[in-house]
Amino acid sequence: MYTQTDLLRWRLNSYAALSFLVLLLCGALMMGIPLREGGENSARQLLTVLTTSRVQSVAGWADHSLSVVWHIALRPGVRALLEQGEGENDKSNALLAASMGITGDTAALSLYNGMGRRVAHSGVHIPDALCEEALRSDHPVFVSAPFALHSSRYMLFSVPITANASHDAVGAPFVMSVKGAEIIGRVLLLRDLSALEKILAPTMGAIVPASCVLFMNDSMLGTTQYKADKAFQEGSQRALRGERGIVASEDMVYCYAPVNTHGWGLVAAVPLSVLHAPVNRQFWTFMGATVLVYIICMAGFIFLSRPLTGKILMRAHELEKEIDERRNAQEELEKAHALLQEAYEQRRELAGNILATLEQLRSEMATELHDNAGQQLTTLLLSLDYAQKRLQAGNLKPAAFFAVLDRAAKQVQALQKDIRRMSHGLFPPALNLAGLSHTIKQLCKDFENGGLRIHCDATPLPATSEETALSLYRITQECLTNIVRHAAATEVFISLQLRENIIYLTIEDNGRGFTLPAKGLVGHLGLRLIQERAQYCNGTVTIETAPGEGTLVLVELPL
């Protein structure tokens, strides 16, 4: 039989249960319905974001393709093939084969001269009809429609090579500069569309695994199972007109958007049930969580002693988290200290090498002054003194005395030439008088010999700081010295250009090359000095080399 205490406890529990139920049910209805509507809107916005991301990826792929072909068109070695005027051979094909390494999905690369004759080729065979279409194109940039070849799909990109090698930028400004210029050749790049098809394919495990269709040049790329849907056709037409948005049919949702600067359109398709499936899961998860909260609240109401234990456990968790954060901060500080110590040791080693190099240079100059200039001056002094004594004694005829003076003048000229050579080695006076471009061209002439040919394309630059000009000159001098001493090269291509307020210095040789160390430029003092000079001027240095494949040094310094 129940007592009054039991009945009162039962009533209190019933009132609490009913109150919690009404409160949570109202809260669930007030929050769940807007959450579901907002989730559906968020799903569509997510589809829009996904489509925009795919558009950016497609545009990035196309921009990268054009950037690759422009980069190949601007390489000095490719221009040298056109200037030679020879037909296709193993050497020219090998140069293009090395250029194919810029991107992994390049299937073929061809170089044609202005007469439509192929100069070099590497990779799979490009259909002749497609090559002729690219050569007949009136546009500076030619992009073909996708086509199948050898069970794969490809796209052809083609850009012209003009007679003037100095251009301001790669991209739209470069295309503007091509108009009206003399085209001496074209570069044809055949790219595999597997990477582009991966961008368009549905992503497994994604929140919205949408299928994408890319419209380009009256052709499509991607899934075409929705072609008969009117909403799909409407979205594709709007995308090609440069519009973006979402259209829906009874069971499908299509998001369309244009691919900027390429005249392409992208349509992303996803079933309505798939699009709203995460929203439905979240809604029922929310309802389940509401029921769980109800149970937890009732359990907490019954067991009033547990809040204290919960607070203690929460505080302990906070303390443990704080200890972990401090431990992680200590580890990060130790790593930073190790990196700083390593950088300090590298700087110290470099400073020691620089001091040793300076002392060696001073020793060499002292030796050269003593052994060369000093001996020449001593010989000249003795010769003049002997001639003076004989002349005073009357034993020397005027003709013989004039001959002595002539020999002395020649010795003075030779000595003056040696002193001028040493002075130019310390600091080139032409750098302040004639400018950086002229000084580098003169430096190339000084390094040329019977077995080495240097092709220098140095564009006159606007006024630069003395540190920047001297750094570029010293970097060129160091590279040429290394090529003469170690590379055993026969040809060197040097390019000095200015694009978008950035000075680009490219030095490429066909020598024996070498293997770059895995950790920095250890053991290469000259290359480390080149890197330090570029960093001093807020620039960067990129070195590409391999045994038997020559060396490419690219220096970028801000104007």
Image (cartoon, rainbow, N blue to C red):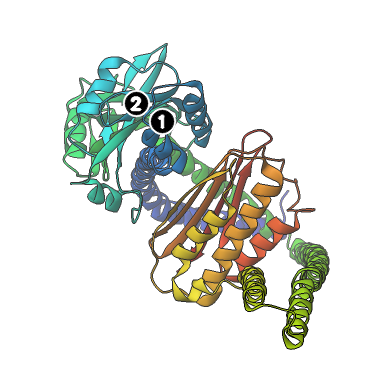
Q: Do the residues labelled 2 and 1 touch (CB within 8 Å)?
A: yes
Q: Is residue 541 left or right of residue 122?
A: right
Q: In this view, does 365 lie to the left or right of 20?
A: right
Q: Which residue lies furthest to the top in this view?
A: 150
> Counting residues from the N terminus, which is met first, the one under dot 2 or under dot 1?
2
Picture coordinates of residue 304, whole percent (x, y): 73, 63
Residue 376 visible (yes or no): yes
Spatial separation of the CA atoms under disc 2 and disc 1: 10 Å
In the rendered view, would you say 64 is above or below 447? Answer: above
Q: Mark 1 points at which residue?
A: 196
Q: Residue 175 carries which label?
A: none
Q: What residue type is labelled 1?
A: Leu
Residue drawn at the location 41% of the way across and 25% of the way down: 120
Q: Is residue 429 left or right of residue 336?
A: left
Q: Is residue 316 left or right of residue 411?
A: right
In the rendered view, would you say 87 is above or below 440? Answer: above
Q: Residue furthest bottom?
A: 392
Q: Nearer the viewer, residue 358 or 352?
A: 358
Q: Decide: few, some or many residues near mark 2? Use Cα within 10 Å; few <14, some 14-19, many ≥20.
A: some
Picture coordinates of residue 510, whole percent (x, y): 58, 38
Residue drawn at the location 59% of the way across and 52% of the way down: 542
Q: Mark 2 points at which residue?
A: 155
Q: Decide: few, some or many residues near mark 1? Use Cα within 10 Å; few <14, some 14-19, many ≥20.
A: some
Q: Which of 362 and 284 is in front in this view?
A: 362
Q: Which amino acid does label 2 sit on?
A: Met
Dot 1 falls on a residue whose secondary structure is helix
